[in-house]
Image: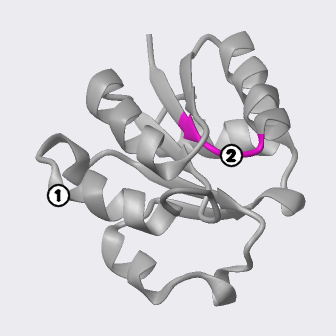
């Protein structure tokens, strides 16, 4: 089963995506901040990560920097899922090999699901 890690501090949003992805047959785990997100991906080894940028304790960019230092984490696809416009995002993000950048308000959960399937080459 394809595994997805959702690192998102807004529980309403993370639960909405959990339901959407589980209904589509994915195994979903959630972390509510960047620090827990790093711990989650190290233990869970997801096939893809959906990562918010603005979170307490550790932001998404800091979490991704740590994930990318891990051998396994160097190649896992990461989709940034945030309400921060791409022009406002940290410049360090470009060096961290993100698959795509989604502004939450611009896409429906169905469209996000399609982006995940595309990133994983699932039809």
Q: Main secondary structure of the magenta part?
A: loop
* Front residue of 57 and 104: 57
Residue 69, numbered label? 1
**88 displayed left or right of 62:** right
CA gap between label 2 and label 1 equals 23 Å
Query: Is residue 120 among the parts visible in the rendering?
Result: no
Task: Please provide the residue range marked out in magenta.
Answer: 6-10
Q: Residue furthest left?
A: 71
Q: Secondary structure at mark 2?
A: loop
For image coordinates 29% across by 24% down, the residue present is 43
Q: Position of residue 41 (x, y in %)?
A: 36, 34
Picture layout, residue 32 above or below residue 65: above
Of callouts 2 and 1, which one flags the residue occurring earlier in the amino acid sequence?
Answer: 2
* Front residue of 91 and 120: 91
For image coordinates 72% across by 44% down, the residue present is 112
For image coordinates 64% across by 46% down, the residue present is 115
User: Does the stretch in magenta take in 9?
Assistant: yes
Dots 2 and 1: beta carbons under 8 Å? no
Q: Position of residue 57 (x, y in %)?
A: 52, 56
Residue 55, numbered label? none
Q: Position of residue 13 (x, y in %)?
A: 81, 39
Q: Residues within 10 Å of mark 1 (few under 14, many from 20)?
A: few
Q: Position of residue 70 (x, y in %)?
A: 16, 49
Q: Residues within 10 Å of mark 2 (few under 14, many from 20)?
A: many
Q: Quadrant of residue 17?
A: top right
- Residue annotated with mark 2: 9
Looking at the figure, which quarter contains the N terminus? Answer: top left
């Amino acid at each position: 089963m394809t595994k997805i890690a959702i690192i998102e501090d807004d529980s309403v949003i993370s639960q909405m995506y959990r339901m959407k992805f589980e209904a589509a047959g994915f195994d979903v785990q959630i972390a509510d901040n960047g620090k827990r997100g790093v711990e989650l991906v190290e233990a869970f080894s997801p096939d893809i990560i959906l990562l918010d940028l603005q979170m307490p304790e550790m932001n998404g960019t800091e979490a991704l920097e740590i994930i990318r230092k891990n051998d396994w984490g160097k190649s896992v696809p990461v989709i940034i899922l945030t309400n921060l416009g791409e022009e406002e995002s940290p410049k360090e993000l470009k060096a961290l090999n993100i698959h795509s950048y989604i502004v939450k308000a611009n896409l429906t959960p169905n469209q996000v699901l399609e982006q995940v399937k595309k990133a994983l080459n699932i039809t």
